Image (cartoon, coloured by chain):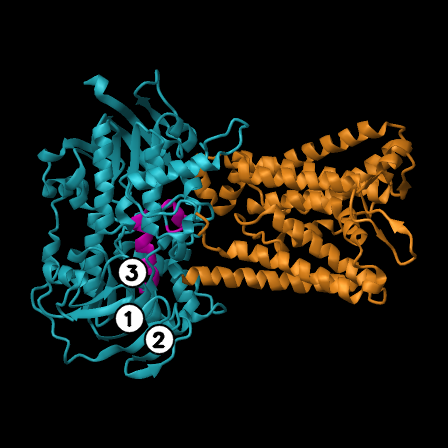
Chain colours: A orange, B cyan
Amino acid sequence: MKNKKLNSNTLLLIITIVLFFVMYAAGCIVYSDKGFGNIQTFLNLLINNAGLLCVTCGMTCIMLTGGIDISVGSLIALDCMILAVGMEHWGMSAPVLCIIVLLIGIVFGMVQGFCVGYLKIQPFIVTMAGMFFGRGMTAVISTNQVSISNEWFVKLANTKIELPFGAYTNNKGALQIPFVRLTVVVALIVLVVIFLMLRYTKFGRSLYAVGGNEQSAVMMGLNVPMTKLKAYVLSSFLCSIGGICFCLNTMSGNVQQATGLEMDAISSSVIGGTLLTGGVGNVIGSFFGVMINGTISTLVKTNGKLLSSWSNIAVAALLCFFIVLQSVFAKIKEKK
Amino acid sequence: MDNNVVLTMRGITMTFPGVKALDNVDFTLRKGEIHALMGENGAGKSTLIKCLTGINAFQAGEIHVDGINGPVVNHSTLDAQKKGISTVYQEVNLCGNLSVAENLFIGREPKTKFGTIDWKTMIKKSQKIMKDLDMPVDVKQNLEEYSLALQQMIAIARAVDMECKVLILDEPTSSLDDNEVEKLFKLMTQLRDKGVGIVFVTHFLEQVYAVCDRITVLRNGTLVGEYPVAELPRVKLVAAMMGKDFDDMAAIKTDEAADFSNAEVFIDAQGLSHKGTIKPFSLTIHKGEVVGLTGLLGSGRSELARVIYGADRNQTGTLKVNGKEVTIKSPIDAMNLGMGLLPDDRKAEGIIGDLSVRENLILALQAKRGMFRLIPMKEQIALTDEYIKTLQVKTASRETLIKQLSGGNQQKVILGRWLATNPDFLILDEPTRGIDVGTKTEIQKLVLKLAKEGKSLIFISSEIEEMLRTCSKMGVLRDGEKVGEITENLTQETVMKAIAGGGSNE
C-alpha cells in the first residue's frame, strides 16, 4: 500500500527540508575555517532557538485553524519579567514562579480563545490586544533590565547535557564534548508531543477540520468554538514554556525582550508549509522552518562583516519564495 | 401505529426578522419509509429541517423522537446526531483537506487503548464502507482529490454509518448524474428496509415518484398536507405545491420551429480550447437563438462556456463577436462586449451573502461601468425594485441581506444582476438547479422572452426536458469534447442517444 501519490503539501515539506540541508551544507563549506561544520554549531542552533521552537509549535496549531496569534512575543517578555522580578525582588522560589508563568499562559490563552471561539472576533484583533496588554504589563512590573542570579535557576541554565558521541577537537586542539541545554530537551519533547497530538488525537484532527472548512466542521458535529479556545490555550501555554526556555538563555527580564518574535514564529510556520488560510501544515515543517530561520542568522553572524539586517532580508526572500510556491501548487491543483 | 413512528414534529413555528418562515407545521416520519418533503422556494423545507437539526431555534412547537421521553430540542448538529438524526446537505459539508477515511469518522474516530486515534482500524473500516457501497475510492487520499459527486456520496456514507434512526437528505441529488442517483436510490431503499426513516428533500418530481412512500407538502411556511405517494399524482402534487393550477410547461415553447439560418451570427467560435478542461470546439450562435449544452456531469459543459466568457483563457482558436474578431483576456473584456455569465456554483461564485439584495443586484453593472462611476442611489433603487418585481423575488425588502433569501430567490437575484447589464449574450449555467418547479417555469419563460428580444443565450442544464423546451439547437459534450450538435428532431431520445454516444449525430 505504498503507492500513495505525492501530494503538493508533502512536496512543500520536502522542499523545506532539502533547503535546510543545502543551506547548512553550504555554510559548512564556506565557513569551514570558522568552525561552522562542528557538531556544536548545530547544537547551538537548537539551544538558541529552543524557545522559538516551542512558540512555533503553538503558532502552527493556531494557524491550522485559520487563525493567528501575534501576542506571543509580548507574552514571552511578560513571562521573563515575572520570572526575573519574582526571583530577584519578590524573593519567590524559582519552581513556583515557573508554575505561575505556565498558569498565566493558560489563562491568557483562555481569554483570547474565548474571544475568538465564542465571541467570534477576528483572531488578529484579539491577539493584538493581547500583544499590547502583555507588553504593557511587562512595563508596569518593571521598566529596568533585571538580571537573574537565583541559584536554582542559574544551575538549571548552566546544566550541560553532554552527548555520548560526536566528540571532536576544535581548532585550538582541545577536546570538545558536544552538549545541549535542558531547553533543547524541553523543546524537542514539545515538538514530539505536538506532532503526535496533531496526528493521533481527536483534538488534533479537529484543528485541521476547522481550518479546512469551518462550516463543514460544524455540520459534522465538531465543537468549533471549543476547538478554537483550546488551540489558543495550547498556543499561550507552549508560549509560556518557550518563555521559560527563553529566560534560561537570556537570564534576564526586559521590556523590549522578544520583540517581533511572533513574526519569527509565523514565518517559520509558513516556511514549514503551514497555510495562513488553515487546514494544511505540520510541526515537522515548522521545526525545519525554525532551523532555517536560525541558520540564516547564524550564517550572517558567522560572516561577521554583514549587517544583521541581512538575515531579515533573507527571510523575506524565503517567505516570498514559499508563498509563491504554495500558490503555484494550489493553482496546479485547481487545474486538475 | 404509534410504535411505528420514529419522529413527530407538532405545531412548529419559527420567525426570521420580518418573515414568518414556519407557521404551525406538523411532520410525521415512520420507521422504514422514505418521506419526501416538497414545496416551492421559501416554502420552509430547509427551515423545518434546520429546526430539527438544531441549527435554527424555533419559537413554538414540539419535537418527539422515538426512544426519547419528552420533547426534544436540539441545540446543534452534534446534539441531533447523538439522538440519531443525521443530515446530508445539498452542498457537500466535508473537509477537503482531510482524507476520505477521516471525513467518514471525524468526531467519532475509533480509539486505541491509549485513547489515541486508531488509524489502522479507521482505514480498514472506511475501506469496508466504500466497498459495500461499491465506490472506487482510496480512503487515504484527501477528499478534495475526488469529484463533487463522489464527495456527496461519501457524505451520505458518513451519515449512514452513524447508525441513524432518521436520515435527512437535503437535495442530495442536485450534483449527481443519473448513474450516481441510481446508486443513491439503491442505498436509500436498503436503508429503508433496515427500518431507517428517511426524509428526502428534492426538486426532481421523477425522483420522488421513483423512491418515496409518502409526501408532505409545504407552502409559504404552512402545511398543505401529507399524502401517500399513490394517492397524489404529479399534477396534483404540483398544484398542491404552487397553490394554483399548474401552468403546463410544455406549452411554453411555441411550436413554430425557429429558423436562424438567415439571422445574424453573434458568437462565432472556431477551434477554441483550454488545456485540461475542453478540447478545441467550434460553435456559432445567432441573434435571438438559445443554444443548449448537454452532456453528463463533468463532460465539459461549463468549461466550454467559461472559455467563451474568458474565465478560462483560450489557448487556441479564434472568437468573433458580432462579426469582429476579439481576444478576451478576462471576464471584464467579455462584459464590455455585452456578455454575461451566470455561474453554476452560486454559493462560491455568485452571491455575496453579507451584501443586500440591492448591492448584489447592481454588482455587475457597477463593475462594467467602472468602480469610480458610482451608480446613483436613485437608479440603484429603481433597478432593484424593477427586477424584484419582474423576477418575483421573495424578499422582505431590497435591503435584506441576500443570505437570508432561499436558494431559488438568490438565483433570481443573480439572474437579475446580469439582466441589469443589458447583455446581448448571456450564458446561464444550471440556472434552475435546486429551485422549485414554479420558479423553473418562470426562468424558462424569461429565457424565451430574452431570445425574442434578440439576445443570444447559452443554456446549460442537467434536465434535458427543460432544454428541449427552450433551446433551438443543442451542443453535445462528452469527456471534455464537443462531439456533436443537434438542430433538428430535438427529442429526449435523440439527445440521450447523442450523450451516450455510439455513432449518431456525429
Asked whether the residues under the numbered discs 2 and 1 touch, taking CB atoms below 8 Å apart as contact, a structural biologist would say: yes
Q: Amino acid at mark 3?
A: Asp
Residue B188 horizontal side relative to residue A180, left or right: left
* Alpha-carbon span between mark 2 and mark 1: 9 Å
Circle 3 sits on which residue? B429
Could you say where residue A16 lies in the image, as x and y percent from the top left?
A: 62, 57
**Range drawn in magenta:** B398-419
Asked whether the residues under the numbered discs 3 and 1 touch, taking CB atoms below 8 Å apart as contact, a structural biologist would say: no
| Frontmost residue, A125 versus B379 | A125
Residue A7 horizontal side relative to residue B466, left or right: right
Q: Residue at x 16, y 45 (%)?
A: B206
Q: Which mark is residue B343?
A: none
User: Which chain is mark 3 on?
Assistant: B
Circle 1 sits on which residue? B425
Could you say where residue B91 lies in the image, as x and y percent from the top left?
A: 35, 46
Q: Specify whether disc 2 shares its chain with disc 1.
A: yes
Q: Residue at x 87, y 43 (%)?
A: A143
Q: Is residue A52 magenta?
A: no
User: Which chain is mark 2 on?
Assistant: B
Circle 2 sits on which residue? B337
Up-down relation of residue B420 to residue A232 (above or below): below
Residue A208 horizontal side relative to residue B343, left or right: right
Q: Circle 2 — which element?
A: loop
| Frontmost residue, B90 versus B277 | B277
Q: Quadrant of the C terminus of chain B?
A: bottom left
Residue B70 horizontal side relative to residue A91, left or right: left
| Frontmost residue, B107 versus A131 | B107
